[in-house]
Amino acid sequence: MTTQTLESPRAERDPAPAAADPVVTGLGVAAPNGLGTGNWWAATLRGESGIRPVTRFDAGRYPARLAGEVPDFDPDAHVPNRLLPQTDHMTRLALAAAVEALGDAGVDPAALPDFSAGVVTASSAGGFEFGQRELEALWSKGGQHVSAYQSFAWFYAVNTGQISIRHGLRGPSGVLVTEQAGGLDAVAQARRQLRKGIRLLVTGGVDSSLCPWGWAAHLAGGELTTSGDPDRAYLPFSADASGHVAGEGGALLVVEDAESARERGAAPYGRITGYAATFDPPPGSGGTPRLQAAAELALADAGLSPADVDVVFADAAGRRDADRAEAEALARIFGPYGVPVTAPKALTGRLAAGGASLDAAAALLALRDQVVPPSGAALRPADDCPLDLVTGEPRPGPLRTALVLARGRGGFNAALVVRTA
């Protein structure tokens, strides 16, 4: 098992496509507006928000007091008792999502050849809760405990390892740490493994850092809104945008070799046809953000043009400068108001490494149901964000191709293209 942290500037395109694009055959979701794929998707189409006052700890003394918390999660109902002492909230959410994804795909891991299936996920902030628990134990009981740095590295590996061990997935495994972009980077790494001959990967991201230590880090980042109104706190692309709301959860996907999926009669949600990642230049260097380049490279990787894209799932930072930069990039690619754009994360908050994979799941379900899910009902794009933003109600298709965008703190950009199966 390896933990990968992508640190150097990169502009990546995958090798030439294989004979068939990999397909997504299973989804598992834990989101602030619904636990389980069906509950979350129905709430998303209704425009139902999961942003509420923090309940997982006392946030009354903090300037930011809203979060997207996964509702109705009972660890005893989703995680074997033997695993409860050695897992924290994030890992338990991930274990529940993995069970749902594999069940949705109709996969019996025990029936697969040895080493033919693995796990590649993304993480970025979930180690805060684990690290806090270690520090509390150190302070209260004394004795030897791992350092904070060691706890984070170990935690990232364990999160993936628990999924691998529970389901007997002994093929390639790894963790990518690129913050919000990680959910797409993990899916791309899964695609690379499939091209090497692996049959199936569980991939995506589930994250959570809703604990006092994690909250302090969110506040130190300076990007959280301090609004106390859940309906108007996180308003990406709006003139009233004041930052984002932090959330927890995400989505895990079963990504499979297309021929293997056909052989077992699986019904795919869609195909992964293109991906690219870029890295922004250092602040103050005079360079321009490279989200546009990531999108264009992903379309080129898929062999498509901007005219082929039917909907964009935006990164939607919730900060005026970042929103304006994304809107301008989309206008340069598609023309002003040139393509429907949606930001369903306005209903959940930004989920760190879980956010982009949840958007990928939303894109696949949008293709399946031929409908664009809405962003928050209160959203109205500012005049300097020339976007055809879908708000209020779902918008019917036809849809064949979706582009999913993500930006991670520190300069990471990723773009994923998914198409109907």
Image (cartoon, helix red, strand yellow):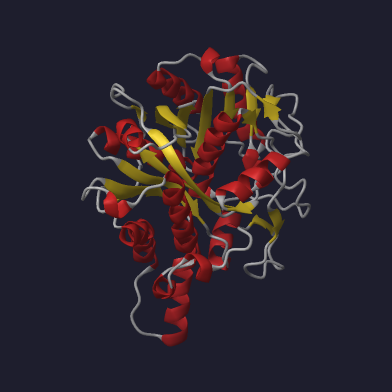
How many numbered discs?
A: 0
Residue 228 placement: quadrant: bottom right
The answer, for residue 69, to whether it is visible in the render is: yes
Q: Residue furthest bottom?
A: 141
Q: Nearer the viewer, residue 154 or 223?
A: 154
Residue 35 percent across, percent down from the top left? 59, 55
Residue shown at 40% from the left, 71% from the top: 83
Residue 272 placement: quadrant: top left
Q: State left or right for residue 13 relative to residue 139.
A: left
Give the position of the N terminus as an image quadrant: bottom left
Q: State left or right for residue 214 relative to residue 202.
A: right
Residue 56 percent across, percent down from the top left? 62, 67
Residue shown at 69% from the left, 49% from the top: 225
Residue 409 to residue 310: above or below: below
The answer, for residue 123, to whether it is visible in the render is: no
Q: Nearer the viewer, residue 341 or 281?
A: 341
Residue 415 percent across, percent down from the top left? 47, 30
Residue 196 percent across, percent down from the top left? 23, 35
Residue shown at 52% from the left, 32% from the top: 405
Q: Residue furthest left?
A: 114
Give the position of the C terminus as an image quadrant: top left
Q: Nearer the viewer, residue 143 or 107?
A: 107
Residue 157 placement: quadrant: bottom left
Q: Nearer the viewer, residue 3 or 92?
A: 92
